[in-house]
Amino acid sequence: MKKHNTVVGDKVLTGKARLSYPSLFKPDTGGQYSDDKYKATFLLNKKESAAELKVLQSAVLKVAKEAFGVTTKLSEIAHPFRKGEEKADENGDIPDGYDGVVYFTAKSKYRPDVVDQAVKPAEEAEVYGGCFVRASVYPYSYVAGKDKGVTFRLGNVQKMDDGEPFGSTGSKASEDFESVDTPNVEANEEEPFEDDDDDIL
């Protein structure tokens, strides 16, 4: 079989996307489907990010035509774009954050630069599943057995805004409690506690 010559497209920016399943500071290892790569999934709202999605789709199609022929259509190859509704479980429940979005995953064997809004190195705790980011990605072609397609290589990532962390439940401590004054121990001396076996409270 003729060897496939990988076609790598130009760098593309995702636009503002919600981050999911990030492995940006350490490669994904130890899991059933781990591949020892740096990766992340990016969720873009189908309506609000229509322009950005069109740019990404055009970049993938351009690579596909160069790699597999000018008449190639995305429907004829494997491509990275998925609808959030495709993640619905057997009861039809869609995971948090995936309703109404198109998502894709980008990977790299190299660690990406991850920066904050000021383009300064970001701390790992600042970049979590549920926050909003943008990323640079590179579409490239591949052939694996009988499968052929185009996917994304991950470039770099910039955090843009905070968001509700995926998997969070309940409220924050700051929402539950108010600050309290610390009592002055010297001014409020009490009798030493005496254990009473008959008192269970």
Image (cartoon, helix red, strand yellow):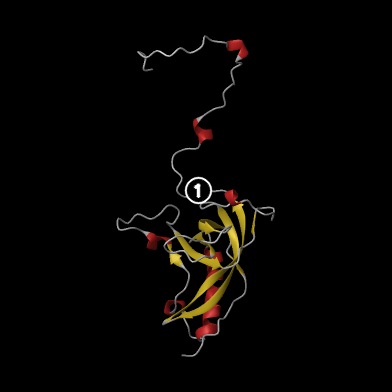
Query: Where's residue 101, x and y in %?
Result: 46, 60
Relative to residue 126, is residue 195 depicted above or below?
A: above
The residue carrying pointer 1 sits among few (fewer than 14), some (14 to 19) or many (20 or more) residues within 10 Å by Cα, namely: some
Which quadrant of the rendered structure holds the C terminus? Answer: top left
Between 23 and 138, which is closer to the camera in this rendering?
A: 23
**Residue behind mark 1:** 165
Label 1: element kind: loop
Between 192 and 148, which is closer to the camera in this rendering?
A: 192
Relative to residue 165, is residue 43 depicted above or below?
A: below
Residue under the image location 53 percent in, 75 percent down:
60
Residue at the extreme bottom: 2
Residue at the extreme left: 91
Q: Amino acid at mark 1?
A: Pro
Residue under the image location 51 percent in, 53 percent down:
129
Query: Where's residue 130, x and y in %?
Result: 51, 51
Query: Where's residue 107, x and y in %?
Result: 54, 67
User: Splitting the image into 4 quarters, where does residue 139 fall?
Assistant: bottom right
Number of residue marks: 1
User: Splitting the image into 4 quarters, where does residue 174 fall?
Assistant: top right
User: Splitting the image into 4 quarters, where does residue 194 fall?
Assistant: top left
Query: Where's residue 36, x and y in %?
Result: 52, 65
